[in-house]
């Protein structure tokens, strides 16, 4: 259908073309009264506008999609809309609003048994706490997301969250922890022949050339 064509262009990095197809799909779904289709089209339009950096316009579309999803009782779509709203608000620097939306999306994922969604919103909460420079909370949420990705066997997301944890540990001044998790991330990415391995290798190399931390003074 037209929505699939839109997604194809979005995947090709052509959001303007994607928007054309999503708008055509939306007109048809509205004409035939397909409310779930309408919500999906509006959500896809939001994602395409987000790809263009037009986050306010994206928010408008996500909110319309959310309203329809709530009306038709589509809980998973509702959760996805809330999570997308969170991302858009985070991009605009509205971190607290973003977190409120992530919390709501997380609760729906947990209630509906959507483990991948649960991990996604836990990871996004981790990013939000990092934006607020609360590194302990950021690491806690990334670790919870990592545990789920390991359970469901999503190796790429596992590697990504190990990489994030390493970055947070480095920001926190814990180079030993950063080295440990980045080594795990490197193994994960190399096993999949993922090019991200090269970036993680460079981070590990940078750790080795940094001067060692001063030893802590012994307490009396």
Image (cartoon, grey):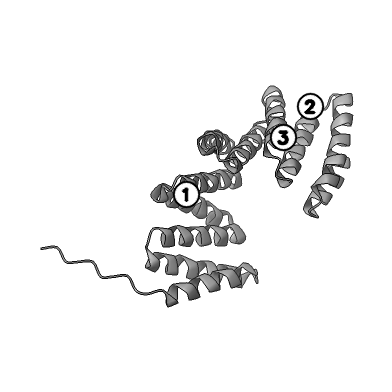
**Labels 3 & 2 near each other (Cβ < 8 A):** no
Q: Find residue 151 and report its horizontal and vertical position in percent.
A: 54, 55
Which residue is denoted by mark 2 in the rendering?
35
Looking at the image, is mark 3 or mark 2 earlier in the sequence? 2
Which residue is denoted by mark 3 in the rendering?
57
Looking at the image, is mark 1 or mark 2 earlier in the sequence? 2
Label 1 and label 2: CA atoms lie apart by: 37 Å
Q: Secondary structure at mark 1?
A: helix
Mark 3 neighbour density, 10 Å: few (under 14) some (14–19) many (20 or more): some
Q: Give left or right: position of 110 versus 65.
A: left
Is 172 placed above or below 141 here? below
Mark 2 neighbour density, 10 Å: few (under 14) some (14–19) many (20 or more): some
Looking at the image, is mark 3 or mark 1 earlier in the sequence? 3
Quadrant the N terminus occupies: top right
Q: Residue at x 79, y 30 (%)?
A: 38
Quadrant the C terminus occupies: bottom left
Which residue is denoted by mark 1 in the rendering?
130
Q: Residue at x 75, y 31 (%)?
A: 39
Is 136 in front, or is 185?
Answer: 136
Q: Residue at x 52, y 39 (%)?
A: 95
Is 60 placed above or below 146 here? above
Q: Report the mark closest to the observer, 3 or 1.
A: 3
């Amino acid at each position: 259908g037209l929505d699939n064509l839109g997604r194809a262009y979005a995947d090709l990095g052509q959001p303007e073309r994607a928007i054309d197809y999503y708008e055509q799909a939306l007109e048809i779904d509205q004409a035939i009264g397909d409310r779930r289709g309408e919500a999906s089209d509006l959500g896809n339009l939001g994602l395409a506008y987000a790809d263009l950096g037009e986050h306010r316009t994206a928010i408008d579309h996500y909110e319309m999609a959310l309203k329809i999803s709530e009306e038709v009782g589509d809980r998973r779509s509702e959760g996805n809309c809330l999570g997308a709203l969170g991302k858009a608000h985070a991009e605009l620097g509205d971190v607290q609003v973003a977190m409120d939306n992530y919390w709501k999306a997380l609760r729906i994922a947990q209630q509906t048994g959507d483990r991948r969604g649960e991990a996604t919103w836990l990871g996004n909460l981790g990013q939000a706490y990092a934006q607020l420079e609360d590194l302990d909370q950021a690491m806690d949420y990334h670790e919870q997301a990592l545990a789920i990705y390991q359970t469901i066997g999503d190796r790429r997301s596992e590697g990504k969250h190990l990489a994030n944890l390493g970055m947070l540990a480095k920001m926190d001044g814990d180079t030993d922890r950063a080295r440990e998790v980045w080594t795990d991330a490197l193994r994960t990415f190399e096993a999949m022949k993922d090019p991200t391995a090269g970036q993680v290798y460079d981070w590990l190399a940078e750790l080795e050339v940094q001067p060692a931390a001063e030893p802590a003074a012994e307490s009396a």
